[in-house]
Amino acid sequence: MGRILHFRQLEVWRESHRLVLMVYQGTKGFPGDERFGLISQMRRAAISIPANIAEGFKRRGIQDKIRFYNISEGSLEELKYFFVLSKDLGYISSNDDLMAQAETVGRLLNGFIASTERRR
């Protein structure tokens, strides 16, 4: 692929952005009283993943980059919990697709962090 010049070229960013779109679509059917509760929390956690990848990508220091990528990992784990909660509350019938995409993002993010750490 050559040199990556923009965060949008990163597979991990593209897949995490896809997860955000899935979360937005999936939360459309949640009860209205969750608008400022679970819906907001899920969307914020989801958005945090690609946003921190993008911010970390632009940072110059390796440690600084890794710090932002670690924040993405934390947000991803938080989001996985929200998928479990949403299913247990009956807001979604299945969280399989969401969890599968989250696992894909997690694997990519783990590899991306490891690759970044090797550049030290």
Image (cartoon, grey):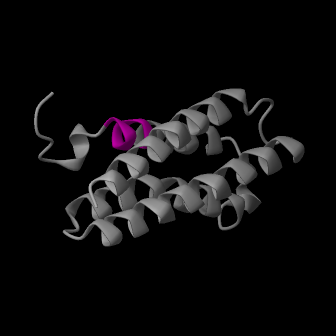
Q: Residue shown at 50%/39% (left/top)?
A: 105
Q: Quadrant of the C terminus?
A: bottom left
* Horizontal relation, residue 54 to residue 47: left or right: left
Residue 100 vertical placement versus 115 (above, below):
above
Viewer-nearest residue: 3 or 17: 3
Q: Is residue 93 above or below residue 102?
A: above
Task: Find residue 38 and report its image quarter.
Answer: bottom right
The image position of residue 28, as x and y in percent, is 61, 43
Residue 102 percent location from the top left of the image: 59, 39
Q: For the point 11% across and 46% down, which residue is it?
A: 5
For the point 11% across and 39% down, which residue is it?
3
Q: Is residue 92 magenta?
A: no
Q: Position of residue 109 (x, y in %)?
A: 46, 45
- Relative to 92, is 96 above or below? above
Q: Quick check: can you spot residue 25?
A: no
Name the main secondary structure of what is drawn in magenta. Answer: helix
Residue 86 seen by the camera? yes
Q: Residue 33 location in percent, x, y? A: 75, 61
- Magenta-tinted stretch: 11-16
